[in-house]
Image: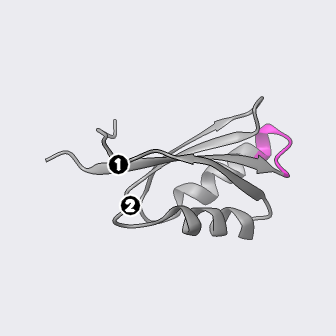
Amino acid sequence: MTPQHASLELNIHGRDCSGCARHLESVAKRIAGVTKVTTLLNDRKVVVLYDPAKTAPAVICENIAAAGYDTIAEGVNALQPFNHV
């Protein structure tokens, strides 16, 4: 059975360089249930794939905020099959 995942797209404020992007990815990847994190440097966005049975958008945003970044959720995609490669 394919696990169900959702994606969360966030605008990130306070992230200005590639070092910040790496730090942000590291923070997000440590959250239980997060399976993939992609930062979009030029757009100052991050896309997080996660298992909604293990975490929620609010938890992801709280962890990122605790690391010193302000977040604005752009969208949460409905549950969808996702094969983590």
- Inter-mark Cα distance, 1 to 2: 8 Å
Earlier residue among tags 1 and 2: 2
The residue identified by callout 1 is: 79
Residues at marks 1 and 2 touching, judged by CB atoms closer than 8 Å: yes
Q: Is residue 61 above or below residue 83?
A: below
Closest to the observer, 31 or 72: 72
Give the quadrant of the C terminus.
Answer: top left
**Residue at 73% in and 56% down:** 71
Q: Which of marks 1 and 2 is in front?
A: 1
- Percent across and percent down for residue 7 are 47, 46
Q: Which mark is residue 52?
A: 2
- Percent across and percent down for residue 6 are 41, 49
Q: How is the image coloured?
A: one colour
How many C-alpha atoms fall within 10 Å of the one at disc 1: few (<14), some, or many (≥20)? some
| Residues drawn in magenta | 14-20
Say which amino acid is labelled 1: Leu
Please check the rendered image and state whether residue 16 is part of the magenta-colored stretch, yes or no: yes
Side of 75 relative to 71 (left or right): left
